[in-house]
Image: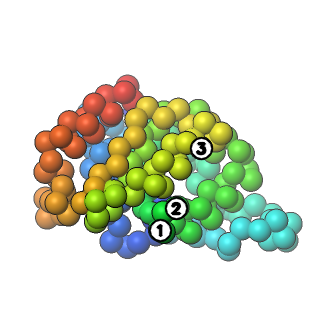
């Protein structure tokens, strides 16, 4: 199984990147590709830019990465209760190629933050809109208080409950 995992964040030290990577590697015998959305940076989307530029190669490359995957794991960072500007822009450009961005792939949607909210607002938005973009959401999980629940030295979830929830979710991808 080829699993595409990424954080919907452009932070160089993204805790969501760590969570997506950790979760993807819980899948036995998976071929995991971990993306960095910084590799797909484009001008801010507008219809005028689309008319002027067409569809940027980066958007097509991102769409192609999804096409090649059997399953997706996305961990959403939250900025002011919503998507990061970097991910929203990448998503907007990619949706102009095909509104079915997720291409009916099985998807696990995660979110985390340093605080008690665990980026649950953005996760709720992502899960709520997923069917419009052809995501087959197999599970979602908000991880609050990241630094209390994840050991960044060993790159391991330390909460027994969270680890059990993640293992249950990844089992639904088979």
44 in relation to 111, above or below:
below
Looking at the picture, the colour scheme in use is rainbow
> Can you give x and y, in whole percent of width and height, for residue 71 in the image?
46, 37
Residue 32 in view of the camera = no
Mark number displayed over residue 148 = none
In percent of the image, x 39 and y 48: which residue is there? 110
**Gap in angstroms between the C-alphas marked 3 and 2:** 13 Å
Q: Are marks 1 and 2 in contact (CB under 8 Å)?
A: yes
> Can you give x and y, in whole percent of width and height, for residue 10 in the image?
46, 69
Which residue is labeled 3 in the image? 129
Q: Residues within 10 Å of mark 1 (few under 14, many from 20)?
A: few
Which residue is labeled 2 in the image? 82
Q: Earlier in the sequence, mark 1 or mark 3?
A: 1
Report the side of 128 relative to 151 (left or right).
right
Q: 117 or 136: which is nearer to us?
A: 117
Mark number displayed over residue 79 = 1
Q: Secondary structure at mark 2?
A: loop
Q: Are marks 3 and 2 in contact (CB under 8 Å)?
A: no
């Amino acid at each position: 199984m080829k699993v595409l995992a990424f954080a919907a964040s452009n932070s160089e030290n993204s805790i969501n990147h760590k969570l997506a990577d950790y979760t993807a590697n819980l899948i036995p015998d998976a071929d995991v590709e971990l993306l960095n959305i910084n590799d797909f940076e484009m001008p801010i989307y507008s219809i005028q830019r689309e008319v002027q530029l067409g569809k940027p190669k980066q958007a097509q490359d991102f769409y192609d990465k999804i096409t090649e995957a059997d399953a997706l794991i996305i961990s959403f960072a939250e900025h002011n209760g919503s998507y990061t500007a970097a991910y929203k822009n990448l998503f907007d450009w990619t949706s102009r190629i095909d509104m079915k961005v997720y291409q009916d792939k099985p998807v696990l949607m995660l979110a985390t933050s340093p605080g008690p909210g665990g980026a649950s607002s953005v996760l709720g938005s992502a899960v709520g809109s997923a069917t419009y973009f052809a995501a087959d959401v197999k599970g979602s999980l908000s991880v609050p208080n990241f630094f209390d629940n994840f050991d960044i030295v060993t790159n391991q979830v330390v909460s027994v409950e969270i680890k059990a929830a993640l293992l249950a979710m990844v089992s639904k991808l088979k």
